Amino acid sequence: MLKASMSEDMHCCVWCLEKKSQAPSWQTIWPVSQDNYLCNTCAEKLVPVGITTCSYCSRPREKPGICYDCERIEKDPDWRGLLDHNVSLYRYNHAMQELIAQWKYRGDAALALIFQQNISQLYEKRYANYIPVPIPLSPQRLHERGFNQAEQLASWTQRPARCLSLLRLRQKQYLFPVTKALTRVLHEEKQSKKTRRERLAATRNPFAFTPAQEVSVNSKNIVLFDDIFTTGMTLRKAAKVLKEHGAKRVCSITLARG
Amino acid sequence: MHFCHVRSPQTGQIICLPESLAEKASIVAGPAVISELPLLPFPSPVSEEPPLFAPDIRSVLYGKELLLDELPFTIHELAALLQSQHMTIRSGLKQTENGFCCQRCHNSAKQFFGVFPCARCGQSCVYCRHCLMMGRISACSALFRWNGPAPPISYEAVCTWEGTFSPGQAQASRAIISTIIQKGERLIWAVCGAGKTEILFPGIEHALQNGGRVLLATPRTDVVVELLPRLQAVFPKTDIIGLYGKSEDKQKTAPLVIATTHQTMRFADAFDTVIIDEVDAFPFSQDKSLVQAVAKAKKQHAALIYLTATPTPALKKRVKNKQLPVTKIPRRFHGYPLPVPRFKWCGYWQKRLENGKLPHSVERWCASHIATNTPAFLFVPSVNVLWKTTEILQKTYPSVMGVHSEDEERQHKVAAFRKGEIPLLVTTTILERGVTVAGVEAAVFGAEAEVFTESALVQIAGRTGRKKETPAGDVVFFHAGKTRAMLDCRRHITAMNEEDAEGGKRNNA
């Protein structure tokens, strides 16, 4: 159970720890949107990727279509068609960098709460019949960090965002549990410490398939979860392993588009 | 990693060891998550010299309390020292009656503790979000402390400063030396521009020569960076380290340490003299974490010196009750009195600002300063007001600039202002301290706002007339209704000036 505060009242912003202004509105009486974890100042710092993005990788663009990098990769026979597409929530701006640094590197696990609502909404709306699979950490990294940020993001698929969507879900009857179908068998340097060229050149696949799971991957759709999409190599390598084991479609939800 | 309490075969004392190092037969409590074990008393220090390989560990850990993640050693390299009690372990979080208390930052407010499923201990783990910047302390983290004899440190100190003190400075510096000798507590209440840093030199020299470690704690990184070369120049033979977020000195030990509040929290039982600069300006000065960080960093008997121009009400109260001796320096080093602020009513300025106009009086003040080439600060209460005011002024005077705390070009703009390239700088309270610009005058626009406390206003007024050549300066508070803070500020300044005029009557309690 993740909590940002042990006190009962939620008057502080989860990120800056300042008191949120509590201007009364009609939501005070009828709280429609769920827990609001950020104060207005912090909420404004996170910029969504926008409406016109590359349809493969979610990179912000001026007109719809496919970006140059994706075009290149889709021509490469080794990488073509592995990852069907990626959806990112936010731009990887300065504020997002700081937030991720505080969350991942300083270990402020509770910051994952900020994305709870957006991720569960996105999952229900577009990926409700996909199996959520988090990108794993190596055991060393997991011990060092104490938690897997991708697993935290994937876990938000397990709670319906609103009462209305609860009703919708009941009709559909698709809700897969978070499935840890992958393990990381290669302990590498952090991706963030590598250049684009180094990332593309690293050909060894750090992921392996974990067979014993409640849900079989065979001919299923899968949605991968990770925090940042930069070149997409990590996600493609993970997708490759899953496709080798019979997965039908593999998409990904990432927090930030680097 | 889990921990146990073990009865030590050598001394019979109960000590805390990691599960992997404990012998099954001698376990008294545990193995468990360290915060769930009962509290142990502090072990008595070990006086035997540690084994040969220990000096590296000692130089990193001496006088500090660190997490295993912060130590460049594995638990197996530390095993022998832990068993011999040259190093001791205690829990990072202490369980209290109604929650937890962080043993590093002393946070015990419930809203600053998070909970997460921890992969290290496999349980729901509470962690402190207050001092997270320094690495996470959770219910399963252990703090390591050096418990053996001190490393050999050279306390050589020769002060090469060759200035002369004003009478007020001379008296304060004598008071500091006697406080250090008596290991007492003292407030040095010196007006802005009294030359506070210099008066510390003789005291620091004395403390070091007598083999005492000295900590100079200051609220901001900028100050550490600025003070380090200055002190190194004054004490060329002394090892000095500066500790702040990105400092490279963190693994070193030195007799003289300059540190930010956060870095102060890492120390334990280390200093014979602690000097706190700008005691009222510490982040979180409202809560007790600084007081407790300093209480932990200093030795049990140590001198504690507070240095400020604007003591907090809490300090003033202690002075008034004769619990805290005080030395005042009411006169600036150049001997001229402090400029007294004047008040100017400027109507309901918010509405005028909405319409894209400044109040006439403010506009006239800005215009006359730009026309006569007098550098001027215009302090505003918030970033929003800052944007609007700068925009309005830039229409007529394009070279006017605005700065705020998150402005990445802050340093450049201040430098340009010093050079005279920017005639008028609009700023939030960020520049209220530490900035010295020759011949500058200051105005506060919207002085009735809550952010302008008495101490903020005194500091702002203290920006003016700091150089000998231009000892006077205009300070105006443009307001829409006088506040208590404004009146207190004026009273504070006139009282200091009167005290000075009375020939330096100082109440040394």
Image (cartoon, helix red, strand yellow):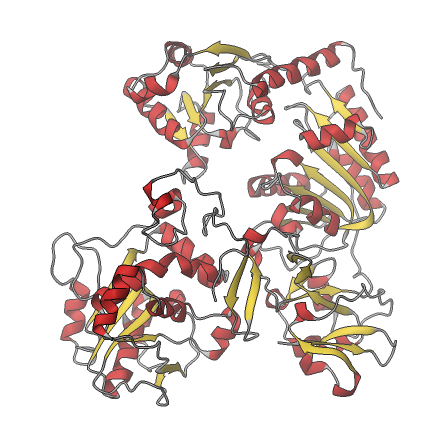
In the image, residue B408 above or below residue B114: above
Residue at x 26% of width, y 82% of height: A240
Note whether residue A257 is visible.
no
Report x, y in % for residue A132.
31, 74
Quarter-wise, where is residue B390 in the image?
top left
Quarter-wise, where is residue B459 in the image?
top right
Report x, y in % for residue B356.
29, 20
In the image, residue B112 above or below residue B429: below
Residue at x 62% of width, y 57% of height: B250
Quadrant where the image shows the C terminus of chain A: bottom left
Report x, y in % for residue B156.
79, 48
A55 with respect to B217 (left or right)? left
B10 with respect to A77 (left or right)? right
Quarter-wise, where is residue B55 in the image?
bottom right
> Which sits in the foreground, A246 or B310?
A246
Residue at x 61% of width, y 19% of height: B489
Report x, y in % for residue A222.
25, 77
Note whether residue A113 is visible.
yes
Number of marks drawn: 0
Residue at x 71% of width, y 78% of height: B30
In the image, residue A156 above or below residue B6: above
B243 with respect to B370 (left or right)? right
> Which sits in the foreground, B107 or B266?
B107
